[in-house]
Image (spheres, rainbow, N blue to C red):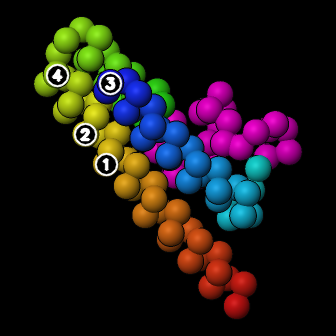
Amino acid sequence: MVIKDVDKVFATAIRVVQGLYRDGVLQKPADWTFAPDLLQFYEAKSSIEQDLYLMFLEYRMRTFQGAFHMNPDYMHWYGWAPMKETLQKIKDEAVKLRAEKTSAKQ
């Protein structure tokens, strides 16, 4: 159950960042097929993408590992809690980036 839940949280974060690319707030590099491209984590150009990759490489895996090894404390404090915290951080940063883009147009 928690594995599906953590993937839903991660999918929400991907959709938020993908929306920034779709709406032109973030610019997709010419050599990227998709944006965000999770395989380009070393080449992330923005802090919001760095947070997304941290969710993918660290918090999601820790949630999975804690659940798989039946260690709810580790799963929660090192995986699930930072995952949820980072999702909110990404949502807040997306609002800020959109506002900056809108004010730059005016």
Q: Looking at the rendering, which quadrant does residue 37 occupy?
A: top right
Q: Looking at the rendering, which quadrant does residue 66 occupy?
A: top left
Q: CA distance from mark 1 to mark 4?
A: 18 Å
Name the quadrant of the C terminus.
bottom right
Cβ atoms at labels 3 and 1 below 8 Å apart: no
Look at mark 3 in the image and give the residue it sits on: 1
Q: CA distance from mark 2 to mark 4?
A: 12 Å
Q: Residue furthest front?
A: 1
Marker disc for residue 85 = 1
Residue 54, placed above or below residue 74: below
Q: State which tag comes first along the sequence, 3 or 1.
A: 3
Q: CA distance from mark 4 to mark 3?
A: 13 Å
The amino acid beneath tag 2 is Ala
The amino acid beneath tag 3 is Met
Look at mark 4 in the image and give the residue it sits on: 72
Left/right placement of residue 36 relative to residue 33 reads left
Q: Which residues are magenta?
A: 29-53
Q: State which tag comes first along the sequence, 2 or 3.
A: 3
The amino acid beneath tag 1 is Glu
Tell us which disc is closer to us: 3 or 1.
Answer: 3
Q: State which tag comes first along the sequence, 4 or 3.
A: 3
Which residue is rendered at x = 65% and y = 75% of the image? Answer: 101
